[in-house]
Image (cartoon, helix red, strand yellow):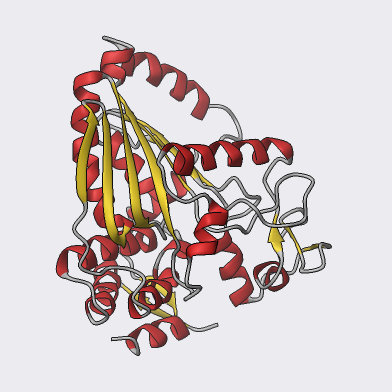
Amino acid sequence: MGTTPLTVDEIYDLAYRCLTSNGCDDANASAAARTISTAERDGAVSHGLFRLPGYIKSLRSGKVNGQAKPKAENLTPAAIRLDGDNGFAPLAIETGTPLLAAAADEYGIAVLTIRNSFHFAALWPEVEALAERNLVGLACTVHTPMVAPFGAKQAFFSTNPISFAYPRPGKDPYVFDMATAAKARGDIGVAARDGHELPPGVGLDADGNPTTDAKKIHQGGVILPFGGYKGSAIATMIELLAAGLVGDYFSYEAAEADNKDGGPARGGEFIMAMSPKILAGMGWSEHSEDFLTRLESMDGIRMPGQRRFDNRLSDAPREINAELVEQLNGLI
């Protein structure tokens, strides 16, 4: 597999040009390109340029509004509903995050629900943005069925990711972003493309048999929840938060409504922000830092998100799949 070296700025430019060439205005293209280039910067390959053909398919099919203008509505002083105007999620998130942060700073805890939007990216950018404001962030979303509940062999959940960030003033936050599936579908897609085997327990083939073949899982198979019934329970919680509480599609409804163009499906996102300054009071940072310092000093510990933080310090070009770069240049 050949690669093409691209700087983070070149990755942003490639994504921006692809998006604007296919119906996005500047605001929507800029937000999505920031999301894509940030993922590549931090080594999250499965959520970077790998996703861009799907973005373009959804623009070309007319499913996604490339001129979307997200609109916020205050349900209460601490509950904000944002209508994404059928656009990609990055602009909706960038629009809603400052409003959410301001509400949490004033009231201690606030929620942002995003409807009528198409989420196709990692979740850590939104919670990190809250941690940068010294707020605790929690976010989750759903997509279309690809994960079988514990004990079943039929897809019902999405990979139902959840992310969490806790601020550490003067340091990188404690942050994780994880699928409630045994492995994220994007990572399985990359493994299938590159011919890599997967560990046992990730998924089943089309006949319901356990397999380590990424292609068999990706094409007609199903993914399993992590941790068996525990992951299945958390996936159910996320469906209820990001669909039931938000008032948008559950995973099966998203699949029924989708036009199957290969791009993202419409769905909701639930984001919560909490102020440790208000909730815990003075000394919250020092108290939490003592705990986190003790945790990360233990032998064998690697804090979640550390690889991303290390990757973003490098100014070196990122090695991008050459066939993907050629494909993307053909979409401009």
> Looking at this view, is 327 or 114 the one in front?
114
Q: Residue at x 22, y 77 (%)?
A: 20
Task: Please indicate whether residue 153 sits to the left or right of residue 281 in the image.
Answer: right
Q: Quadrant of the N terminus?
A: bottom right
User: Residue placed at 36% from the left, 38% from the top?
Assistant: 271
- On the image, the x and y values in percent for residue 288 come to 39, 18
Residue 150 position (above or below residue 37): above
Q: From the viewer's perspective, tell me whether residue 2 is left or right of residue 209.
A: left
Q: Is residue 320 left or right of residue 188?
A: left
Q: How many marks?
A: 0
Q: Residue at x 23, y 72 (%)?
A: 24
**Residue at x 66% of width, y 50% of height:** 182
Indicate the position of residue 99 as horizontal and vertical percent values.
Answer: 19, 37
Seen from this angle, which residue lies furthest top?
A: 282
Observer-nearest of 328 and 103: 103
Coordinates of residue 2 in the picture (x, y in percent): 50, 84
The answer to whether residue 123 is seen in the rendering is: no
Closer-to-camera residue (174/299): 174
